[in-house]
Image (spheres, helix red, strand yellow):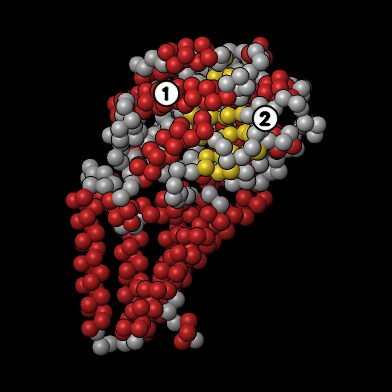
Amino acid sequence: MRRWRLLHPFLLAVYPVLFLFTQNAADMRIATILPSLGIALAATTMILGALWLVLRDPDKSGLVTSLVLVAFFSYGHLLNLGRLAGANFGPNDSLPNGLLLVILLIAVAGISYVTLRTRSSLKKVTSILNIVAILMVVVQLAIAGYYVAGRISESAAPSEPSVGKNLPAYRPDIYYIVVDAYARQDILQEVFDYDNSGFLDHLRQLGFYIADSSHSNYARTLQSVASSLNTEYLDKLGDFGANTYDRVPLSDFIQTGAVLRGLKILGYNIVSFISGYDVTTMNNADATLTSGIHLSEFENLLVSTTPLSYLLGVFATQHDRHRERVLYMLEKLPQIDEVASPFFVFAHIVSPHPPFLFDDYGNPGPDERPFSFSDGNHYFEKGGDPDQYVSGYRSQIRFVTGQLQRCIDRLLVRYGNNPPIIIIQGDHGSGLYLDWNSKERTWHRERFSILNAYYLPGQRNQFLYPSITPVNTFRVIFNSFFGLNFELRPDRSFYSVWKHPFLYDDITDRLNDELPPATSHTEESTDQ
């Protein structure tokens, strides 16, 4: 059994990865963590092997390796404890981040020195560490197994697209541009004192139809995009159960949605961008476009718990990489040539949604808190305040709107007399008055009022109407361009709390009359 004596270094390498997965399992697949597990185990093997070659003592080598791992994966958590205690510093502030790294290095060096100098046997210490590490990992495996087993039983199969296999003669390219959290004109004016009428008038002059009474069908991206790409409300896609916590099956409806499968039958190639929000990256696309080296959401979270978040930030922070993704998409959209026409382009631009990383002119914005896509009350729980939200959102949407207008102009110039279909759509509105735990503390008119603009070549705007919602977007397109006869769905809006995404409350009838709730943005959430 001596060969299995040093279990604890490997288990302590696995534990942080498993722990992070179980904390976010409702939004992630188990396969997401496999690369991280492989890297953690490989790095542990190299450290342990190097120490054993020098020390020739397995117990001392294992103890020092485990010490290094604990310090490495504790770094980000210790910083977060400091922030929770009231310390006001960002992810790249040299003094607190660098100071903590120095303290950890001194602690590791000191304890390692004592360990190496001791003449006592460490076999019992090794045994105790093995038992503790086994228990820690078993608990996380049990939690992960619970999530995965529940996911298997709750997953639903996407419905088959009702699309004929005869290829129509006219198949324009289609651009579906989802601008995350882009609110409707009246909300922008009322809440953020921002007037985007110049942009909307410009779109109208180009031939766009602006659905100026449009709402989203759901309050969050995953629900909204899954619904629109299947032209159906979520309760019709599968019986998830009102108390189902798991949101990952919804990503199946994005990856293999009825719209995508219908377009494939019609001969379309699929193009997707890596947005930084993993569930809206279409892994089965014919071309997946990215601005450079890409870490998954899980890998970004894992890096944030280690000193790598500080060391790599010297070259490019997560904030920098996200800015690059947004700018890359807006620059690349008018010049896609990776696949042959006809093609369908899905671009999920995670902006003006937080984090607020652009000022009015595209310079790095003031939001230097730890990188997060948190919105609504989650944004405020992570250190933001209402004034920061208003000013950050206003600056970011002003810049993104200008870049989006430039993008559309270039796109239409490229196509000349054979223009494509273009949909520019908010997946939901802004989140200043959004509370993920309470319908009563949420201002639904703000969260559900969206930009919804259509460019349908061939004067097909007669199929559109002011209150059209995303669930009907592709029903209209399939009907008007491909001769199908999809019945339009009633335009409804559904709110659900964060913990129970499938426990819907139909709030359609109160959207237009509702006033902002008189509530504190900093009230503590119960879902963290």
Can residue 40 be seen at all in this image of the molecule? yes
Res 244 label: none
Q: Which is nearer the eye, 46 or 441?
A: 46
Q: Residue at x 38, y 54 (%)?
A: 303
Image position, residue 369 (x, y; %): 30, 41
Figure check: 77 above or below 352: below
In the rendered image, which quarter contains the C terminus?
Answer: top left
Residue plotted at (21% across, 50% down): 94
Query: Which residue lies at the image location 36% right of the left edge and 45% below the top edge?
Result: 318
- Name the foreground residue: 259 vs 67: 259
* Residue 240, x across and y down, in percent: 65, 41
Q: Is 206 left or right of 313, judged from the image as shown? A: right
Placement of 81 over or under 463, stated as above or below: below
Which amino acid is tagged 1? Thr
Q: Which residue is mark 2?
A: 232
**Dot 2 lies on which element?**
loop
Between the residue at mark 1 and the residue at mark 2, the CA separation in whole angstroms equals 29 Å
Q: Is the residue 12 above or below the residue 96 in the image?
A: below
Mark 1: give few (<14), some (14-19) or many (20+) Cα within 10 Å: some
Does label 1 or label 2 sit earlier along the sequence?
A: 2
Q: Residue 236's image quarter?
A: top right
- The foreground one among 272 and 383 is 272
Nearer the observer: mark 1 or 2; the answer is: 1
Q: Position of residue 221 (x, y in %)?
A: 52, 34
Task: Evaluate if marks 1 and 2 touch, with contact meaning CB atoms under 8 Å apart.
Answer: no
Residue 223 picture location, percent across and down: 57, 34
Secondary structure under badge 1? helix
Residue visible at 25% across and 50% down in the picture? 82
Q: Nearer the viewer, residue 98 or 284?
A: 284
Q: Which residue is mark 1?
A: 401
The amino acid type of the residue labelled 2 equals: Glu
Observer able to see residue 223? no
